[in-house]
Amino acid sequence: MTTVICPGSFDPVTNGHRDIITRASRMFDRVIALVVINVAKTPSFTADERVKMLRKSTAHLPNVEIDSYHGLLADYVREKGAVAICKGLRAMSDFEYEFQMALTNKKLVPEAETIFLTTRSENMYLNSSMVKQVASFGGEITDFVPKEVHDDIRAKLCNQPAIKET
Ligand code: PNS
């Protein structure tokens, strides 16, 4: 059984993230979408909220699990026996940082590969910061985030009531 880790801040999950997780789920037996807790960042959503939103967004994908982790990604990869780390690549601007992380992780956990899936053209411009900025000013985020978490994001960032989790 092959396991892949899709790590990220997911603050919050976007359509771009979900697309990468979905495509990884067709390539590997088991996908773990991992909310990595980065103490250097001040997230808008708690780790628990980010995990819940990822769960809602991927509930239809039977081989996808959600977890959170505070520590070195390489240690988590080894602990789970994952064969790869999967990341999305939007543009050249992502490349240098991602390349640096991939090389570091290769040193730390040589048995795992980092693979990059190119973002769909419609998600090229998307990132979590942009979603947060639009939502915080009351702008429409329907085209940017999974519909299952749209109201949760608006509720948190625009002070509107959230729909109940089903
Ligand atoms: O969504 P992001 O913020 O681009 O994700 C970055 C993330 C969480 C994948 C990266 O910061 C990470 O792996 N952090 C864990 C700490 C670690 O392992 N650092 C060394 C590898 S460069």
Image: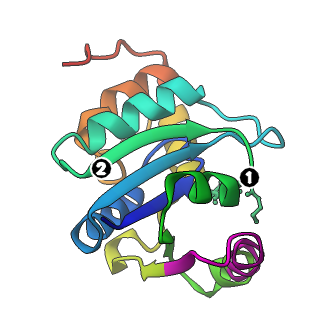
The yes-or-no answer for disc 1 within 8 Å of ligand 1 is yes
| Residue 50 screen position, x and y as percent | 49, 33
At 34% from the left edge and 77% from the top edge, which residue is drawn? 120
> Which stretch did the figure color magenta?
99-115
| Label 2 packing within 10 angstroms: few (<14), some (14-19), many (20+) | many
Q: Is residue 109 magenta?
A: yes
Residue farthest right in this picture: 40
At 72% from the left edge and 72% from the top edge, which residue is drawn? 101
Label 2: element kind: strand
Q: Is residue 161 left or right of residue 60?
A: right
Quarter of the figure with residue 26: bottom left
Towards the viewer: 89 or 142: 89
| Residue 41 screen position, x and y as percent | 78, 42
At 29% from the left edge and 46% from the top edge, which residue is drawn? 146
Q: Amino acid at mark 2?
A: Val
| Label 1 packing within 10 angstroms: few (<14), some (14-19), many (20+) | few
The residue that label 1 is drawn on is 72
Label 1: element kind: loop
